[in-house]
Amino acid sequence: MSAPDTLMSQDLMQEAQAAPASKAEVDRLDFYYGDFRALKSISMPVYDRQVTALIGPSGCGKSTFLRCFNRMHDLYPGNRYAGRIVLHPDNSDLLAREVDPIEVRMRLGMVFQKPNPFPKSIFENVAYGLRVRGEGSRRRIEEKVEQALEEAALFNEVKDRLHEPAYNLSGGQQQRLCIARALATDPELLLFDEPTSALDPIATASIEELIHDLKK
Amino acid sequence: MNVAKDIQKRKRHEAIFAVVGFLALMIGVLTFVALFIDMAIKGAGRLDWDFFTSFPSRRAGQAGILSAWVGSTLVMLVTAFFAVPLGVAAGVYLEEYARKNWLTDLIEINITNLAGVPSIVYGLLALGLFVYQFGFGQSILSAGLTLALLILPVVIVATREAIRSIPQSIREGSYALGATQWQTVRYHILPYSSAGILTGIIIGMARAIGETAPIITIGALTFIAFLPPAPVTAQPPFFSVEWLFSPFTVMPIQMFNWTSRPEAAFQVNAAAAGFVLVIMTLAMNGLAIWLRYRLRRNIKW
């Protein structure tokens, strides 16, 4: 699979590189919670195979911005977008009314602030994205799950207990499981919403290292 | 010195409440225990195999509860068959699909209120609707539908409460992977709320099995010496729904019938039947507790 690009809302260093290809373009994005305008005319590029990080004080709208990408705001009534987020290479506007948010979420992966594994087995957590897409072949699913766990640097730790409940894992492992869950469906862009804020420094370091590896 | 006195005084108040609270608790517990033991002792002499396999009779010593417990069981089956899918679907819809506005607020308040409507009112409604309008007659089907209506609010409320305890992060995790709303309900919401839903269903059923007023209203018999036709037949299609339209009686009505007889021997029968009914109810509640424990064991957030 192609390595996904990563967009993070926490302080990872931005890599300076010569003329990287654009993966997505945010174009004069406004966002409203009801009448409250939470995001004001944001325009920025997101580069292919790069980690783009957002830094800002708590409550400044990092998560709100990130959740525009995969239309999470559509789940709640009264939210409204203006402007565009254009995803390359097909130049589709993720925020367009005629674009189904489900399609957007199938293309973009998301990892949340607090690890949120499903109360199912480790295997079923990673397989879930494939199952909702209707993947029927057991062998395909097994391959994909193993591959995703490898990429999330978790496979060696859990290969003997794939069918045990995911909540037996430590916080850091749970977060890597959530990354594997997002990776299993080959997302074009990965959204991280402060993925290490609920973790200890060692687990944080391993997640940050993992994000740097995923860039390639 | 003054401080010590003050503390003493306040502690006295505490002791007074502890005693009052304990007495209040004991009044409730001891009353039930005394009633239950009294019933068990009075009815013990009649609790044998024959009691469960005999029809009611004019002679108290030969009378049994066969038609009553079979009737109760069949009515409960019909009740569950209608109340469970309707209640769960309505609860899921209200909680996961319906937009939150004044209309859903109104529906919410009314469902909660419906749970408090006296059961005789449901009986009258059922008499007009099921027995006469739909022509189901004074049958097991009518009784099952009546009790299903009665416990529907309980099932809906239990479903909604169980669903509400699922954290939003689980839903967002599912949606973020491209799941539809139905997939999220099917793979997450229903499995994770099943313990709470089942508990609600069983508690509703435990209430329904003891209901007397609505069943009498729709015209259950008080003396019946035959069983409904068997659901399995020798000829194709090998099953029959005739039992649904059969006349019937249920446990509490059988009890009521016996207590209203002048002969003392029938009081013993009533006590024995009451004991069986209480055990049935306790068993259902016990099952609810066990299921909740079993199903929740694997779910943590």
Image (tube, coloured by chain):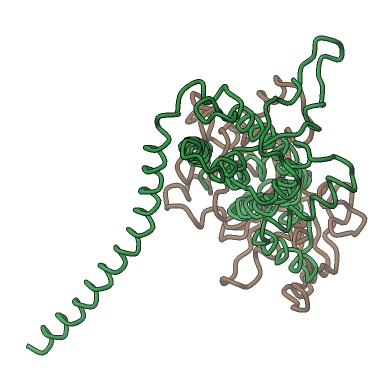
Chain colours: A brown, B green
Residue A64 sits in quarter: bottom right
In the image: residue A188, left or right of residue B27: right
Residue A124 sits in quarter: top right
Extreme residue in the left direction: B1
Q: Position of residue A159 (x, y in %)?
A: 52, 25
Looking at the image, is B22 positioned above or below residue A176? below
Extreme residue in the right direction: A98
Q: Position of residue B117 (x, y in %)?
A: 68, 61
Looking at the image, is A36 positioned above or below residue B195? below
Q: Position of residue A110 (x, y in %)?
A: 67, 49
Looking at the image, is A179 positioned above or below residue A66? above
User: Which residue does the image show at 35% across and 60% down from the upper left?
Assistant: B27
Q: Is any part of residue B114 visible from this angle? A: yes
Extreme residue in the bottom direction: B2
Residue B195 sits in quarter: top right
- Nearest the eye: B24 or A52: B24
User: Which residue does the image show at 40% across and 32% down from the upper left?
Assistant: B44
Looking at the image, is A174 positioned above or below residue A130? below
Extreme residue in the top direction: B234
